[in-house]
Image (cartoon, grey):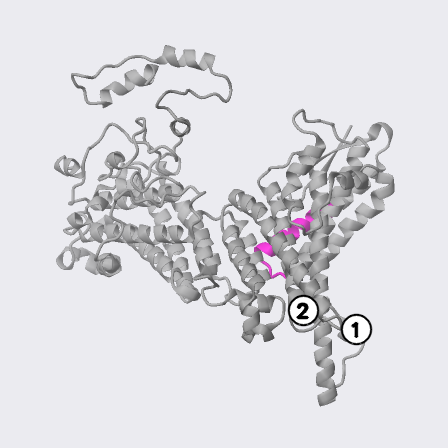
Amino acid sequence: MAGQEARCSTSCFPAGDQTFWTDVSPLIEAVCRELQVGELIHGENFSLFEAMSALEIMDPKMDAGITTCGFHSLEEAIESNAAPISLSILETIDVMDHLLACEATWHKGHSLAQTVFSCLYLLDVERTSPNPLLHSYCRTVRATCELIRSAVSDSRTHEEEDFFTMAFGLVLKKEGDEKCLSMLNAVEETLSRQLRACKNSVAKKKLTEDFEPLQSDPELEEGYCKAVLCRLRFRKAFYHALTYMGKPQGRGLEMAHKHIRSGLLELEGIRESLIFLSSISGNSCKVEVDDSTTASGQMAVGFDDSINRRLLAPTPPRSIKILNWKMALDYFEKLLEDLDQICLMPLNLSMEEILQFTVDFQKSQPDLVARSRLQLLLVHDGKLFGRDLLSDVICRAINMTQLSNNQEFHKNYLVTQLGRLMLNLLRILCTNTAWQRRKLGKSLQEWGTLFHQLEVACNNQLESNSSSIEGKGLWMMQMMNWTGEQTCWIAARYLLLGFELELYSFSEYCMIYWYLDHVLLTLLQLSQERLTIEKDQQRLALAVDASKKKVKKKRGKEAEKEIHSPGILLQQACSYLGKGLAWMLAALTNDHRFVDRPTIFNTEQEIFIQNFELLQNSRVPEPLSYFQFKQSTMHANFLTQFRQMENCFEEALNVLKELRHCAPKGLKRFEEIRQMEHVAEKNRIALSVILAGKGDSLPRVSFEFSQHPCFPVAVIKRS
């Protein structure tokens, strides 16, 4: 330990005959002068593993953060009366609040041992049985933590996430915890009757005759009853919601939704108790601005963040920071709203709609607990929603439900492979955006390989049945096109996530939108081919039925009318916006409307390869080279491409207006459509302003993502 930190910490360590302290600051300063960037200290017993561990020291989520002051064991804490069972009602509420803050801190990435199980009461719940309120609450907290830990662990999304599933040997599940709600209900019923009596002015005077009051002042009894009840009911609603969401095949979603709405109402009650509790404790509303973890503003009794230090890896003395009371409530409110979105998801969605739902769900930036619950709902026992075989899902996706009883189709190796890739895609889409983008990029090669295998199989089938596409050749052709669509969808998602993660520099925007347009056009082409085959088959079936039943054919526009799915319309709008922005950026660059800032690290060609290497390895969409990019953009300018750029933004507006009629108001899709309309309209206006600039009034243009996270708006400034 160096310098002042060493001198300040000596008092925390137990002194002994062998204790010797020395200041190592000069040594550390000398090492810092000698080491170059990227070098690490290497000793005989200091490997790369130890070096990386040393780099993680003081990272709040990587090092265990033990403190040297505090109790060494639960027995020592009990003997010191650090966790008394006989608590005042205000102290009990403080314990509830601090436990809630600890639970939120655990969800955010710290260990159970230093958050929830820093509560001395949880380390020995049986000891709290003389206090029914505290006992039932602690049991429910422990049971809730086990539900969450199991869900996150089962979803296997925590490997790259800030979440500790390790229990460090602490008891998270014990016999009798399944009865926690019956205990909680009994306490709640008693308090509810007590609250009703408090509201009755006549009964209020005789309160002590029928009930044991929570405290001695009858005037405060009602406020305390409300404060405790809303905390108990929130805890019960949260536990119920998690339990019902864990039921297979989504059978408990409706009940989970009801309990989530109830939990949100109780959270409001907890917020409202702030004024009462802080005024009683004399900390009048300081909780809103300070780091207090309780509504009263007081420190909760019965907690010691160093009690479990022997369970953790040895690290420097430091203590983690628990989320404050307001942040904890905000976290749980956001968590319940995200879980509610999952509960409201229809279970009869097509695969296209499911993929779009997961994308829309991610836009609210849900935390890991909510994303884990979504993944477990979507993927269970290798089936969609735990009930639908992936081969049946593929049948519906390619509109060939007649194959549902075809054993050859279900056992086909390529169908099995496609089902495996679809399950993996759903799991990937439920991870955080950074991990999601990396996994999507790596999965592109697998999708491209499967597309190539289907293409070869289709060609072989066509050669053997050269007269027409039917039977096995038909479903293989449809499955090939659908696989190509999913590959292009993944590629587009991969590129757009780069904007959300702010991975691109301004100089890269042009090539990104240029390649994105190519990806989306390929997707639309494959969709059109698949739909054309479907329509041909439908016409053939209708013709056969008409000849048998003599049904009149529909005439005119009604027969030829095409109804595009919202997904296809959205891809069309993105394609027009991407193309318009690519031409706009290329023209502005060639007309020197930007300040040129060349990078000294990579050439433009190297940047092109880095951005699109994974896409070029996937076979679909057809790989494009840097030479093609330069050939198509090097001669772009405003005079020649103005009408083309303007048409792109106008077409985007037309498609978005059509799409707006398909999307109900209030949904995230509707909001995104409005954002994209603003982007298209503002950029269309900007084109005219830029074109009108002449001579010294030549405008300078910059772009900002003020309307949409992936499509920027041009901002014009006069020189």
- Quadrant holding the C terminus: top right
User: Quick check: 236 above or below 28?
Assistant: below
Q: Residue at x 63, y 59 (%)?
A: 483
The residue carrying mark 1 is 557
Q: Is residue 227 magenta?
A: no
Q: Amino acid at mark 2?
A: Gly
What mark, if any, has residue 369 been given in the picture? none
Of 122 and 603, the residue lying toward us = 603
Q: Nearer the viewer, mark 1 or mark 2?
A: 2
**The quadrant where residue 654 appears:** bottom right
List the residue tagged with mark 2.
473
Nearest the viewer among 293 and 522 is 522
Residue 680 painted magenta? yes
Give the residue at x 41% y 67%.
Answer: 251
Q: Residues within 10 Å of mark 1 (few under 14, many from 20)?
A: few
Magenta stretch, overall SS? helix
> Which part of the image, by quadrant, shows the N terminus?
top left
Q: Residue at x 53, y 50 (%)?
A: 362
Magenta region: which residues?
Answer: 663-682
Where is 50 relative to 75, above or below?
Answer: above
